[in-house]
Image (cartoon, rainbow, N blue to C red):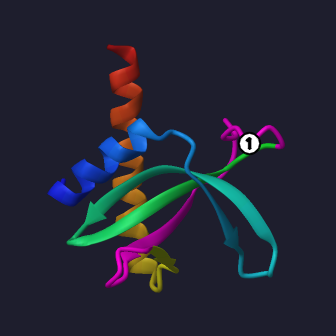
Amino acid sequence: MSKNQNNLDQELDEREEYRVTVELDDGDEIRCAILTIFDVDGQDYIALVPVDENDQPEEEGDAYLYRYFEDEDGNPGIDNIETEDEFERVSDRFDEYLDEQEFDAMG
């Protein structure tokens, strides 16, 4: 885990109410909570989960995975994952993250 990610994770923990609106490929917009930001092969990725009408993360359903970056002014941004190979690597790491969270919840 990179130092930047540690700092960001701490910031996210301190401010739990991060929400973003994502435009999907079909033009629909969906409001999401930031679940985590994680690194795969030196690239940061973000996992987003849809929120319900009460602005609470949905417990069931899909997570959206995107490349995460900050521009030269420090503003956050996301990009689509371009290849199936990249998506596989990111999905595998995200599954590991979920397993770690489940293990931590048991302890």
Left or right for 106, reference 35: left
The residue under label 1 is: 55
- Neighbour tally class for label 1: few under 14, some 14-19, many 20 plus, Cα within 10 Å: few
Q: Which SS class for mark 1?
A: loop
Please report the residue visible at 55 percent of the width from the left and 50 percent of the height from the top: 18
Vertical side of 103 occupied by 12: above or below: below
Any part of residue 2 in sight: no
Please report the residue visible at 21 percent of the width from the left and 71 percent of the height from the top: 41
Residue 96 appears at what percent x and percent y? 34, 46
Q: Residue furthest top?
A: 107
Q: Amino acid at mark 1?
A: Asp
Residue 22 appears at what percent x and percent y? 67, 69
State the image quarter where residue 23 is shown: bottom right
Vertical side of 67 occupied by 91: above or below: above
Left or right for 99, reference 26: left
Whether residue 60 is in magenta: the answer is yes
- Numbered circles on residues, count: 1
Any part of residue 11 in sight: yes
Whether residue 104 is in magenta: the answer is no
Please report the residue visible at 34 percent of the width from the left and 25 percent of the height from the top: 103
| Range of residues picked out in magenta | 53-75
Please report the residue visible at 32 percent of the width from the left and 84 percent of the height from the top: 72
State the image quarter where residue 91 is shown: bottom left
Residue 34 appears at what percent x and percent y? 52, 52
Left or right for 10, reference 49: left
Q: Residue furthest front?
A: 73
